[in-house]
Amino acid sequence: MGNDVEAIGRPSTDDTPAAWRPTLGAWADGDATRFRVWAPAAQSVDLVIAGEAASEPMARDEHGYWELRTADVRPGDRYRYRLDGDRTLPDPASRFQPEGVHGPSEVIDPRAFAWTDLGWMGTSLQHLIIYELHVGTFSPAGTFAGAAARLDEVARLGATAIELMPVAEFPGERNWGYDGVDLFAPSRAYGTPDDLRSLVDTAHALGLAVILDVVYNHVGPEGAYLTAYSPDYFTERHRSPWGAGVNLDGEQSEHVRAFFIENALHWLTEYHVDGFRLDATHALCDDGPQHFLAEWVSRVREAHPRAIVMAEDERKLRRMVSPQAAGGWGFDAIWADDFHHHVRRLLAGDRESYFARFTGAVPDIARTVACGWFFRRTDENTIEEVASADPAVGGVASEYVICLQNHDQVGNRAFGERLHHQVDLAAYRAATTLLLCAPETPLLFMGQEWAASTPFMYFTDHPEGLGRLVTEGRRREFSGFQQFREPALRDRIPDPQAAGTFEASRLRWAERGREPHASVLRLYEALLTLRRTAAALYDPSGTVRVDVLDDDTLALRRDTGDQQHAVLAIVRLRGAGSLTLPRGTGEVVSLDDRFALALSTESPAFASDSAPLDLTIAADVVRVRFERPGAIVLTA
């Protein structure tokens, strides 16, 4: 089973799905290789093997799929398809593009990899702590193998899952991944398909789930050949920020939908990934009777019932995370940026663009922590409104993924500054405590756990003409910001095409052992240990209460469902100040003799320049004096 492409590499249970076989691309079929591609407008399709003069004609079925089974092709052979005797193109479902997006595709046999994760059980949303990483900048090598070699550090930190930014084949040698064009092929810039399999296998051995970021709302501008095979992949009836929308509800859309569903099933079965984050799902428009996203989630669940599926969606529609049995789409969670935006507004002062509607006021941060979001839509067409604290409206807090940093919120800044580059570390430690004690699902972006000195900037490696347009467009995006009103100021924005922009974004692992990085890392390790071991922080039946203590301070209390265990975090996000809080059963800070101090962000272990706070837990009151922003965590 460990080497079988039909198996999903997980223990056999009553909910293990039936074996899955590919229907697109090239795959081993007994002692032969089977090829299948959708090209409904073509009059002929031939298989062209690299290095051979002859080609083999493929047979067409009534739906426009062309197929060929041949014993003359083996794994490692490279091939293209010739359409109508004219254009010779890579396979749109290629498993590997060793010569790049314009080169031939390679036949890959996933059965050759020796998996060791047969006993891997995965993780659940309840215990999910996500660590987002970009393969090219995560390690010095910038490869799948380089990332795998560092995963022990991620596991030791306390994360329970890594989330890989998109790895599908992209043009050039460096890219965020959102310009992918060969959606089934891991990028040759990072290594071979087996290198990615080895990374997943290593992660599972360390107790880490693997979530893959996938992009279905567009393909990149260079090397995209989908429309050469069929103009029906995209439609002008729907528009997206990238142009024509993906055709999910028009003529021939059933085959387009099948292509993206096949893509997910391929990652689940051939690579053993544990789930997905879908990029910008609000750009996937579908007016049909069953929304594509609902069908996609359903098919993923059939293939792997324990898969974790998350969406990035600015609408935060309740039906996205509602069960399909209740008419929802069945996602586990949605990325929710409201927490990030409020905290940045308060701590860093961001107020332009989408930050303008966020106040950064502590009461609004408290409401966001209580709900998971601050703004919402009741449907796709209504304007956003302030969220209610009613859990029936807001749903379960763990259904929202919150962060202080992610690739978008760092990399889409002009200079790729991280939050800790722009705020005092004392405030950063306080905000970190709030993030990791909150009931929402936390996401960390690589390096934030040690307050990495490196930025994360936007980078590409397109051909010269396209690259020049990308550079100009990148700088033009910031023209509406006061800081970049003048062209000369915009010219200071790093060129995404420059290799130095990419290299400057690579993490410097050696700095983890130096201050102030080492103490910040110890804080993250301590908080994540607490999150994994304190029952009140992971009990799904528990209660959450967030109280505003003053203009700069809030208290977050979480109790287990049986009220036997509790965690209380008092977080001061700004300035110095004293608090005197009465002890009583009606107060969020009501304490009894079981409570003890578990952690202070001003401990010398966590702050190389500590300013110890003064805490007194008396019979009738709790008194705490903060010399600057900070947080304490008490446990019962």
Image (cartoon, helix red, strand yellow):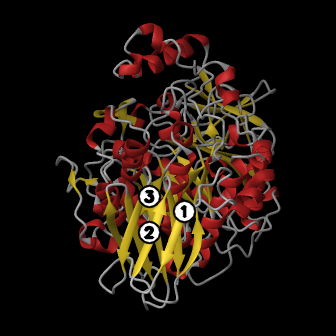
Q: Amino acid at mark 2?
A: Pro
- Mark 2 neighbour class, 10 Å CA radius: few under 14, some 14 to 19, many 20 or more: many
The residue at which mark 1 appears reads as: 613
The residue at which mark 3 appears reads as: 572
Task: Specify the quadrant of the image occupied by residue 350.
Answer: top left
Q: Amino acid at mark 3?
A: Arg
**Of callouts 2 and 3, which one flags the residue occurring earlier in the amino acid sequence?**
2
Labels 2, 3: front one: 3
Q: Secondary structure at mark 1?
A: loop
Taking the spot 37% from the left edge, 53% from the top edge, the residue there is 292
Q: Secondary structure at mark 2?
A: loop
Task: Specify the quadrant of the image occupied by residue 98.
Answer: top right
Q: Secondary structure at mark 3?
A: strand
On the rendered structure, is 268 left or right of 199?
Answer: left
The residue at which mark 2 appears reads as: 439
User: Could you say which is closer to the camera, residue 112 or residue 165?
Assistant: 165
Taking the spot 40% from the left edge, 79% from the top edge, the residue there is 621
**Of callouts 3 and 1, which one flags the residue occurring earlier in the amino acid sequence?**
3
User: Could you say which is closer to the camera, residue 550 or residue 24?
Assistant: 550
Taking the spot 66% from the left edge, 32% from the top edge, the residue there is 505
The N terminus: image quadrant: bottom right
Q: Amino acid at mark 1?
A: Leu
